[in-house]
Image: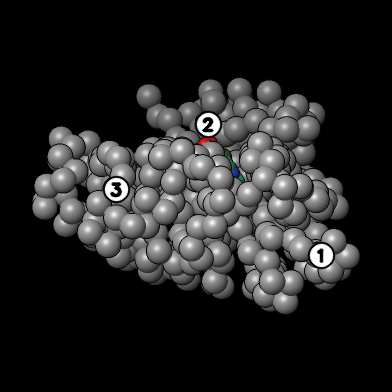
Amino acid sequence: MFMKLLTPGPVQIPREVIEAFGKQPLFHKLQEFKEVFREVLEKLSKVVMGTPIVLPGTGTLAVDTMVYNYVNPGEKVIALTYGEFGDRLIESLESRGAEVFRLSVGIGRVPPPDVVEDLGRRLGDVVAIALVHNETGAGCVNRYLDKLRDVANSLGTLLLVDSVSGVPAEPIRCCVDVVATASQKAFLAPPGGAILYVNTEPRAKYPVPRSMNLSKFLNRIKDLETPYTPPINVIYGLNASLDYILGMGLENYHEVHRVRAEYLYSNLRLTPVAERSCRSCTVTAFYTDRAREIIDLLRRYGYVIAGGVGSIKDYSVRIGVMGDVSIDDLKVVTELVNEYVGK
Ligand SMILES: Cc1ncc(COP(=O)(O)O)c(C=O)c1O
């Protein structure tokens, strides 16, 4: 029976990626595995600036790893939030014992960089600005990363970014101290790979468990080794999905997502959660008081979309446009939803 994922992730992944993933895992100390690992690291390096690290885990582990290796208890952090995953980033920072200054101008709205800078100047001694690049809960993207890089430089702070549902479809073009992401969304691979891009040495003064100790990973990566078993089959999947993405070209890959998302924003008779200037190209989110009914209706036609999260859980739906999704799929979804809400 026909089923297609129009989800925030895991997404509908290309057949060649599934075939690459479904293989006998090699012993990770064999030269044959190291060759594949080297190829994947080289391809990952073409997507975002920094040294790529792959841990066995998902986006949550990537974000916690970023937090625990760069923030120490008692340190001041400015955390921007515009939805559920921004709130979870704050939860992670607080669990590390950071003194978090939450900056929010509402769900689906991105605080301007000058407001971040003013707050940083007023507070003083801030060690990091932390934020979600692409807020999956609100379909909202922060397109000010270049400006925030300048703000971070002028304040002398780190810039820590959760881009779990952003890169490579929502690009990051500037140098970010650490980007935390994952394999199962715009990287088009199965879940199980927590990916970090590192541009600054870890600075943890307190112990970090081995599972997320970035210094140990960085020490061994030049020999294509990891401090414990890597997610071998996810690495096979990434090898194929990165060929697909890089083969398309990064700018083109972004453009394809922009066109898909724009189709929904322009044609769906629902109100987007995010303000126009910051609407995501990977995950769209719309307000509706008939979320459950819309999800069930589409499911009957084989399309899987997601409900809301956080405080707008019962009043929104999310439609992902990453992966093997065509405009024809989006047309069917739009017609079904519009007919339903028009009734
Ligand atoms: C922005 C963002 N951060 C973190 C996460 C957590 O990732 P995971 O579910 O892979 O652990 C997600 C998952 O949707 C996300 O969208």
Task: Kindly state the secondary structure of the residue where label 1 is placed.
Answer: loop
What mark, if any, has residue 160 been given in the picture?
Answer: none
Marks 1 and 2 sit apart, C-alpha to C-alpha, by 47 Å
**Pointers 3 and 2 in contact (C-beta within 8 Å):** no
Is residue 186 left or right of 151 when viewed as pictured?
A: left
In this view of the protein, which residue sits in the foreground, 255 or 120?
A: 120
- Label 3 is placed on what type of residue? Thr
Observer able to see residue 90: yes
Task: Kindly state the secondary structure of the residue where label 3 is placed.
Answer: loop
Report x, y in % for residue 342.
77, 34
Determine which residue is flagged by label 3.
226
> Which mark's residue is nearer the viewer, 1 or 2?
1
Q: In which quarter of the image is the N terminus?
A: top left
Determine which residue is flagged by label 2.
304
Give me the residue at 32% from left, 50% from top.
Answer: 238
Q: Identify the mark nearer the N-term, 3 or 1.
A: 1
> Which mark's residue is nearer the viewer, 3 or 1?
1
Report x, y in % for residue 259.
56, 60
- Label 2 is placed on what type of residue? Val
In this view of the protein, which residue sits in the foreground, 298 or 42?
A: 42
Determine which residue is flagged by label 1.
124
Ligand 1 picture quarter: top right
Marks 3 and 1 sit apart, C-alpha to C-alpha, by 38 Å
**Pointers 1 and 2 in contact (C-beta within 8 Å):** no
- Label 1 is placed on what type of residue? Gly
Give me the residue at 75% from left, 27% from top.
Answer: 314
Disc 1 C-beta below 8 A from ligand 1 = no
